[in-house]
Image: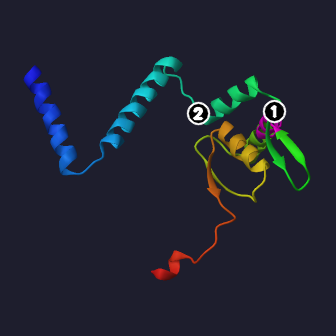
Amino acid sequence: MYLAVIIIAVSIVYYLELHRIEWFAIYAYIIVLFKLKLHVIKTKNKTYSFVDLIESKVDCYPNRVQFINIENEKSYTLKNIDQLANQIGHWGISLGLKQKDTAALMVYNHPDYVSLWVGLAKIGVSSALINTNSTGRSTYNDW
C-alpha cells in the first residue's frame, strides 16, 4: 500500500517538473476543489446558483444601495433590483421564454442591466451578455 502511494506521489512530481506546471497552481486547484466539496456538504447537495446568492443578500440587506445613476442621481437598492428582476422574469415568461433558453442582452451600461440579467436567470434563461462599449476591427475580415 505504502509503495503504491510513494509511486503515485513520485509520478505526480515527475509530471509536474517535466511539464513545468507551477506548484502554486496545483495548490490553488486543490483549495478550490476542497472549498467546493465543503460547499456541497454544507448545502446538502442542493442546487445553488448566483440567483440564490443574490436573493439571500436581498433578505439580509434589502435597503443596501448597490448602484447610483449619476445622470439622474437615482439610487438602486437590492430590494429595487430584486423587484425589477421579478417583473422581468414574469415578462420573460409571458414572451414564452423557458428554462434552458438563451437570450442575448445588448443594453447600455445602466443599473437595470443587472436586473434584466438576474430576472432572466430566475426563470432559467441563460444570457449572452453583449458589451456595447466594444470597439475595434472585426476579425471576420481576416479570413
The disc labelled 2 sits on which kind of residue? Ser
Q: Which type of secondary structure does the marked residue at label 2 adopt?
A: loop
Q: Nearer the viewer, residue 126 or 48?
A: 48
Q: Tell me the kind of residue under disc 1.
A: Lys
Q: Residue at x 77, y 43 (%)?
A: 88
Point 69% across, 41% down: residue: 118
Q: Which residue is mark 1?
A: 79
Q: Residue at x 75, y 24 (%)?
A: 59
Task: Name the quadrant containing residue 85.
Answer: top right
Is residue 59 placed above or below 66 in the rendered structure?
above
Quarter holding the C terminus is: bottom left
Q: Which mark is on residue 103?
A: none
In the picture shown, does residue 122 fall above or below 106?
above
Say left or right for 112 vs 54: right
Q: Is residue 80 magenta?
A: yes
Please say if the residues under marks 2 and 1 sit with CB atoms less than 8 Å apart. Answer: no
> Magenta region's main secondary structure?
helix
Element on which disc 1 rests: helix
Residue 68 x/y as whole percent: 83, 46
Q: Is residue 22 above or below residue 35?
A: below
Task: Give left or right: position of 72 versus 19.
Answer: right
Q: CA distance from mark 2 to mark 1?
A: 19 Å
Give the image location of residue 50, x and y in percent. 61, 35
Q: Which portion, as a residue range, is magenta?
A: 77-85
Image coordinates of residue 129 in percent, x first then y, are 63, 55
Q: Which mark is residue 49?
A: 2
Work out whether mark 2 precedes mark 1 in sequence or the reverse, and give the earlier one. Answer: 2
